[in-house]
Image (cartoon, helix red, strand yellow):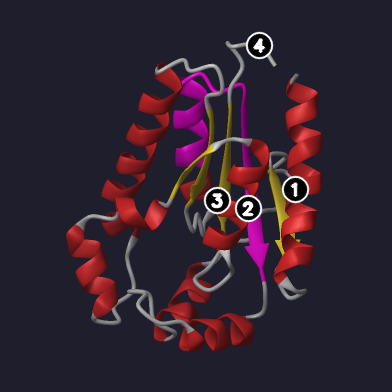
Amino acid sequence: MSNEESWILFIAGPAGSGKSSVANFLASTLQARFIEGDDLHPKANIDKMHRGEPLTDSDRQGWFEAINEQASAYNKQRLQRHHLIITCSALKRAHRDILRESCQRAGYSLVHFFFLDAPESELRRRTEARKNHFVKSNLVHSQFEVLERPRINEYDATIISVVPPLDEVQSEALKVAAQLVKKES
């Protein structure tokens, strides 16, 4: 891959789908920089989620701006390997469109979404089991209420079931990512 080519992968899906685990694995395997999207939430969003209140699209606007700013700034650095993996729920098509368009404007040659999917009951179970995270299980239902899974016309999105064990999910994500990145080289 030449120094001018860059790619960005968004690991998306509802709370509890394993975005951070999959993103960390892909970043280390593909030698990409990993940004935890949750770290970019404004304090008001984190406080709201701590209280068990779902975010609105208006609440998410500042978050998307922060993600876009990080992605754009990173690509402008023009490092030899300026490949980026970011976690972001990207629950709606409009959310993915915002990220897609800003990353294309930032000059990424490849923008792709990995949408991690599982039944609501499974993700509730997972979020109930985790500790020290501001998104609690009661927010899973609100995310499913607004969820718009990628459709076939979102050519840059791959849906991956996260019901299988994590190593199988990571293997599937890596297989798809490796094919995408190979096409870019």
Q: Position of residue 85 (x, y in %)?
A: 54, 42
The earlier-in-sequence mark between 3 and 4 is: 4
Residue under label 3, please give it: 93
Residue under label 4, please give it: 2
Q: Is residue 97 above or below residue 87?
A: above
- Residue at position x 61%, y 21% in the image: 109
SS class, disc 4: loop
The earlier-in-sequence mark between 1 and 4 is: 4
The earlier-in-sequence mark between 3 and 1 is: 3
Label 1 neighbour load within 10 Å: few <14, some 14-19, many 20+: some
Q: Is-magenta flag for residue 114? A: yes
Left or right side of 36 for 82: right
CB under 8 Å between callouts 1 and 4? no
Label 3 neighbour load within 10 Å: few <14, some 14-19, many 20+: some
Residue under label 1, please give it: 174
Look at the image and give the residue range highlighted in magenta.
Answer: 97-117
The earlier-in-sequence mark between 3 and 2 is: 2
Q: Is residue 70 above or below residue 29?
A: above
Q: From the image, which quarter does the N terminus lie in? A: top right
- Residue at position x 55%, y 51% in the image: 93
Residue type, mark 4 in image: Ser
Q: Position of residue 144 (x, y in %)?
A: 53, 74
CB under 8 Å between callouts 2 and 4? no
